[in-house]
Image (cartoon, grey):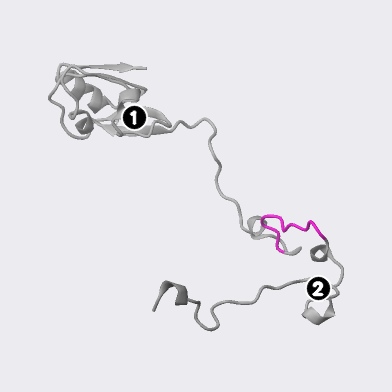
């Protein structure tokens, strides 16, 4: 078999529907759009969530809870991840983003999981109590931005 001999399997392709080409085409007169109504008109677009006049599912389902517009989202970094840096490094959210530890979309919070033995200057938006203690215990400093 050669590349030029390749063709689709029998029944795998359909002939294009050529609408509006007269009665002999099988798609003449109303061009498969039926009589009257929204769908027969040009420029008709089905709106997202529209169910033909039936009450849409988004309105049928009961709504629960609320979204707190004052909530803050933090990117979490544990103390054990900071151990990868060289001693006496100033660790900032920018540096964490460069190293791929955080995505850099939100504020940074340092949590105290793991151990830290090297002194670092850590600058973040929030620290847990245990993280602050571990950084200070390793002769480093924890600064809130």
In the rendered image, residue 75, in percent from the top left (x then y), is placed at: 36, 33
Q: Secondary structure at mark 1?
A: helix
| 42 shown above or below 10 | above
Q: Which residue carries the number 1 mark?
A: 97
Q: Which residue carries the number 2 mark?
A: 21
Q: Magenta stretch: give its range.
A: 42-51
| 57 shown above or below 90 | below
The structure residue drawn at horizontal position 84% and vertical position 72%, both measured from the top left corner, is 30
In the rendered image, residue 3, in percent from the top left (x then y), is placed at: 42, 72
Q: Is residue 11 left or right of residue 55?
A: left
Which callout, 1 or 2, points at the residue further toward the start of the chain?
2
| Viewer-proximal residue among 14 and 33 | 14
In the rendered image, residue 37, in percent from the top left (x then y), is placed at: 84, 66
Near mark 1 (Cα within 10 A), the count class, few <14, some 14-19 or many ≥20, is few
Is residue 90 one of those drawn in magenta? no
| Viewer-proximal residue among 122 and 14 | 14
The span from disc 1 to disc 2 (Cα, nearest Å) is 60 Å
């Amino acid at each position: 078999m050669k590349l030029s001999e390749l063709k689709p399997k029998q029944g795998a392709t359909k002939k294009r529907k050529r609408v509006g080409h007269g009665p002999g085409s099988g798609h003449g007169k109303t061009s498969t759009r039926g009589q009257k109504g929204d769908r027969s008109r040009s420029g008709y677009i089905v709106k997202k969530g529209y169910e033909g006049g039936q009450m849409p599912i988004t309105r049928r389902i009961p709504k629960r809870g609320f979204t707190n517009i004052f909530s803050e989202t933090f990117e979490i970094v544990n103390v054990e991840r900071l151990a990868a840096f060289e001693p006496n490094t100033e660790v900032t959210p920018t540096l964490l983003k460069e190293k791929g530890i955080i995505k850099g979309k939100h504020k940074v919070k340092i949590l105290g999981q793991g151990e830290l033995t090297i002194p670092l200057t850590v600058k973040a938006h929030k620290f847990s109590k245990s993280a602050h203690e571990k950084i200070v215990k390793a002769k480093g400093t924890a600064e809130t931005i």
